[in-house]
Amino acid sequence: MLDTIVIPLLKIAVLLNAVLVSVTFMVLLERKVIAWAQSRLGPMRVGPYGVLQAIADPIKLMIKEDIRPVRADPMLFTLAPILSLVPALVVFAVVPFGGDELFYVTDINVGLLFIISVTSIGVYGIILAGWASNSKYPLLASLRASAQLISYEIAVTMTLVSVILTAGTLSMVGIVEAQQQSGLWFAFVQPVAFVLVFIGGLAETNRAPFDLPEAEQELTGGFHTEYSGMRFALFFLAEYANIIVISAVVAILFWGGWLRPFPNVEALAFLDLIPGWIWFFGKMFVFLYIFIWIRATLPRYRYDQLMRLGWKVLIPIAIGNIVVTGVVKVLL
Amino acid sequence: MVEAIVFYTLAVLILGLGVAVITTPKTVHSVVFLVLNFLCVAVLYIVLRAEFLAVIQVLVYAGGIVVLYLFVVMLVNLKQAPEAHEDPRRLARLGLVLSGAVLLELAGIVVYSFGRVTPASAPAAPGPLTGMGNTEELGWLLYTDYLIPFEVASVLLLVAMVGAIVLARRQS
């Protein structure tokens, strides 16, 4: 009873709160980093160096008026933000933050496939939001967003096949353990796969330089133009939760999760003094920072360039990577 | 006991959502009900300890195929069902024959399997979800005993893919 219900529920409660709080601070971090990149200060008024802005923003969103267009489809208009946030949060159930059982909710033997399939549900939130708003720009944006998501999902999933081949397991904990056994982070075994998954992750979370679904100059605001208040906040939470998911998945699959650098070199054993979850959060933070850094640096793609990159560059490379991995695996 | 409760709850949900799919006037709504239906079927697979199948069900059907349905429905934007040009009675008769055939088939399966599968002769249930899974076993079987059907299916998919591209290009 205690082991099967109470402890998992406690873990889930802690995890959900941790994710949602880190999302609000992620937004603050993004505003700060982009401001520094543009020689500005960013939010400075609320709290020291604007730290409390992370709390002021959600409060503002919660007390804003909730507007629903008259011609909108009431059921789907309500359902869409929920459908986009829930998958983003469910994924964390199989993300291990450390090697000990304390640090993950569950470790199912199809963990990686579970992540892929649950995130593929998130696209409904975007499509239905655009359709249910009964408005031109959101509809166009949601068509763009879902086409982009589907295209890049294929590339990412195919790339992950080569990672699965290398690790020989689908379990997230198992993949990290495989890296421990081989003594090498998979980023050094599968560098091409790492780059592909990271680019695909940028595109799947609709981040710059692939943030066409939210291109203000063309589409006013994107698929959530008609949303306001807390409903809009749910989309916002979903986007940032997805960024955290991608960072966590990349850190686990390619950078050894909770492992220290060179996990099999005895001379570096003193690094084990730092607990595994700190290594993990450190790696995740680096990727979160890179996400923001890229947004501050790179200009947006044109839509046809985006599609060409997905279908004609990333997918062929991913297929080639599978073939090469398979051949090497058979030869070794 | 718990499994029976879960199964019957799911069965009611799946059938109810299935009815909702064909009775909802708005096409987009019926696609959403279809997605929920597929998700319930995935849960049913998990109850049967076929977690790989469950995940693939979500990935392929709910996350892939139905998204394309939704695309088509949204782009076509049907305000109401198109006028049937054919004789409606002919369609009704066809429907009657088809549903009768399906009913017969299901009844046949029930009669045939009744009393055959007893709890004792049923295959031993695989370990819990966290243990050794059926993914490896499924892959092994697909590439050994069922290699030819597997390859035939993959060639069929390739033909469908090439065919779709050829048709799309001819129009432009």
Image: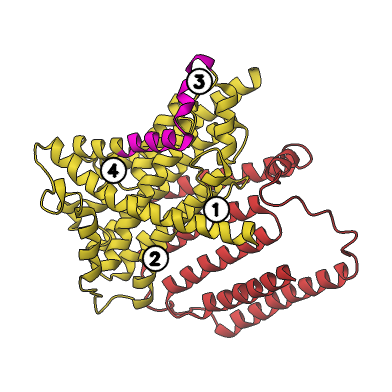
Chain colours: A yellow, B red
> Which segment is the magenta one?
A265-288
Q: Which mark is on residue A210?
A: 4
Q: Total marks drawn?
A: 4
Residue type, mark 2 in image: Ile
Determine which residue is flagged by label 2. A82
Spot occupied by residue B163 in the image (x, y as percentages of width and height): 52, 47
Q: Main secondary structure of the magenta part?
A: helix
Which residue is farthest bottom? B89
Q: CA distance from mark 4 to mark 3?
A: 41 Å
- The verdict on residue A282 being magenta is yes
Mark 1 is surrounded, within 10 Å at the Cα level, by few (under 14), some (14 to 19) or many (20 or more) other residues, namely: some
Residue type, mark 4 in image: Phe
Q: Is residue A34 left or right of residue A161?
A: left
Determine which residue is flagged by label 1. B60
Residue sitting at x 36%, y 55%: A20
| Disc number lying in front (2 or 4) | 2
| Secondary structure of residue under mark 1 | helix
Spot occupied by residue A155 in the image (x, y as percentages of width and height): 44, 39
Q: Is residue A189 left or right of residue A294?
A: right
Residue sitting at x 19%, y 54%: A53
**Badges 2 and 1: C-beta atoms under 8 Å apart?**
no
